[in-house]
Amino acid sequence: MSLAGRKVLLGVTGGIAAYKSADLVRRIREQGAEVRVVMTEGAQAFVTPLTFQAVSGNDVRTDLFDRGAEAAMGHIELARWADVICVAPASADFIARLRAGMANDLLTTLCLATDAKLVIAPAMNRLMWSNPATQENCVTLEQRGVVMLGPASGSQACGETGEGRMMQPLEIVDDLSRLLGEGPLAGKQVLITAGPTLEPIDPVRYISNNSSGKMGYAVAAAAARLGAVVTLVSGPVTLDAPPHVQRVWANSAEEMLNAVMPRAAEADIFIATAAVADYRPAQQADNKIKKQNESLNIALERTEDILATVAGTYKDVFTVGFAAETDKLLEYARGKLERKQLDMVAANWVNQPGTGFDADQNALTLVTTDGEEELPVQSKAQLATELMDKVLAAYQRSAKNS
Ligand SMILES: Cc1cc2nc3c(=O)[nH]c(=O)nc-3n(C[C@H](O)[C@H](O)[C@H](O)COP(=O)(O)O)c2cc1C
C-alpha cells in the first residue's frame, strides 16, 4: 500500500465536488493512510460532517473556536500531525484566501500553521477557473510550493463544459503517493516544455517551428512514472496530457516564458523539449495583411531564450536542453551545453528519414561535461524512458540534488 502509515489531513471546501471527497477519503484509507477531515462552513452546505466522520473513522473538525476539540487536539497540533494537507475540492474563494494568507477559519489557519506539503485540487465553474484573479492566485501559490492537482476538463455540474472539474479521487490518491514517497523522483518537481510556439504576423497568420510535441509528452509521461510531480508547459499540439501530468498551455514564446519562469522557481529538474521560435515578427498587424505586392518583408526580432533564462536565473535547477540539428550535431550540442551552462543536452538529427519531428521514433545523443552517450533509434516512448533514467542518474550524482 503506497500511503501506508501516512497522515493525511483532508480539507473540504464549498463546491459541488465535495460529494466526491467522501469517496476520496475511502480511497486514501484503502492505501493505508489515516485521514482526518476539516470542513469549511461552505462545505457543510453540500455534505454533512457525519458523512466524513463515518468514512474517515475520525471526528470531523469544522470550527476554529471549538473549546472541546481544542482541548483534545489543538489546531497547531493538528497542523503538526499531518504529513500532507490535501484540499479537495478547493473552491475559488478558498484559493483566494490561501493566497492572501488569511486565517479566518480552521482550514486556512491550519494551512498557514503547517510545514507539511500542501496540495490542492481546484474545482469550479470554467469561467471561475479561467478568471485572471483565480489564475494569478494559483500561479502565486505554485511559486510558494503549493502543489496543484488539476483541474480536469469535461462536462461540469453547472451544465457547461470546460476546464475546472476536480480530478478523480483515484488520480488524487496516485498523486499523493507520488508526493509522499513512491518512485526515485518522488517529492521532486519536474518542469517540461513541449511542442512548437506560434508567433503571430497578423490575426490569421503566424510563423512557427515544426514540432508535434510527441517527444516532450513522452518525457513528461516517463518523469511521472518515476514518481515526480510533473508540470508540462505545452505549445499548441493535438496530444492528450499524459496521466498524472499537470498541463499548462502557452501559445507564443513570450507566453511560454511567462508560464515557465514562476514554475521553474519551484522545480528540481527543467527539461526544455519545446521548439520555441527564435524570432517573432517585430510588429503584429491588427488586421489581416492584404495580398498586394509581389513580395512582403516582415521584420523579425529575437525572442527570449527560455532555457538560458531558466539556467541563468535558477542555478540550483538541473537543466536539460534539446538540440535539433541538421549538421554538426555534436559541436552545436556541446556549444549549447557550455554557453547556456546546462547539465545535459539531448541532441538529435532532424534530417534523417523515420526520426525527428512528427515521427514516432527517434534517437538521441546525450552530451554532458563527462562525455557523450548514444541512445539508439527506438520508439519515442522507450527513448523518453531511457532518457529519464539517464537524467535521474545524472541528477542524483549532481550537487543540485539536495
Ligand atoms: C450551488 C453552489 C455551488 C457552488 N459550487 C462551487 C464550486 O464548485 N467551486 C467554487 O469554487 N465555488 C462554488 N460555489 C461558491 C462557494 O460555495 C462560495 O464561494 C463559498 O464562499 C466557498 O467557501 P469555502 O471556500 O470557505 O468553502 C458554489 C455555490 C453554490 C451556491
Image (cartoon, rainbow, N blue to C red):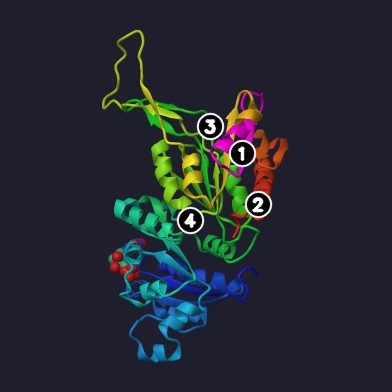
Can the viewer see residue 159?
no
> Is 314 left or right of 178, judged from the image as shown?
left
Residues at marks 4 and 3, CA–CA distance in whole angstroms: 27 Å
- Taking depth in this image into account, of 394 and 341 the one nearest to the observer is 341
Kindly indicate whether the residue at mark 2 contacts the one at mark 1 (C-beta within 8 angstroms).
no
Magenta residues, start to end: 333-354
Tag 2: amino acid: Leu
Q: Is residue 88 above or below residue 324?
A: below
**Quadrant hosting ligand 1:** bottom left
Label annotation for residue 266: 4
Mark 4 CB in 8 Å range of ligand 1? no
Task: Give neighbour class at mark 4: few <14, some 14-19, many 20+ (Cα, 10 Å).
Answer: many
- Numbered circle sitting on residue 160: none
Residue 140 visible (yes or no): yes
Residue 241 location (% of width, % of height): 52, 46
Could you tell me which residue is drawn at 55 percent across and 61 percent down? 175
* Amino acid type of the residue tagged 1 in the rendering: Val
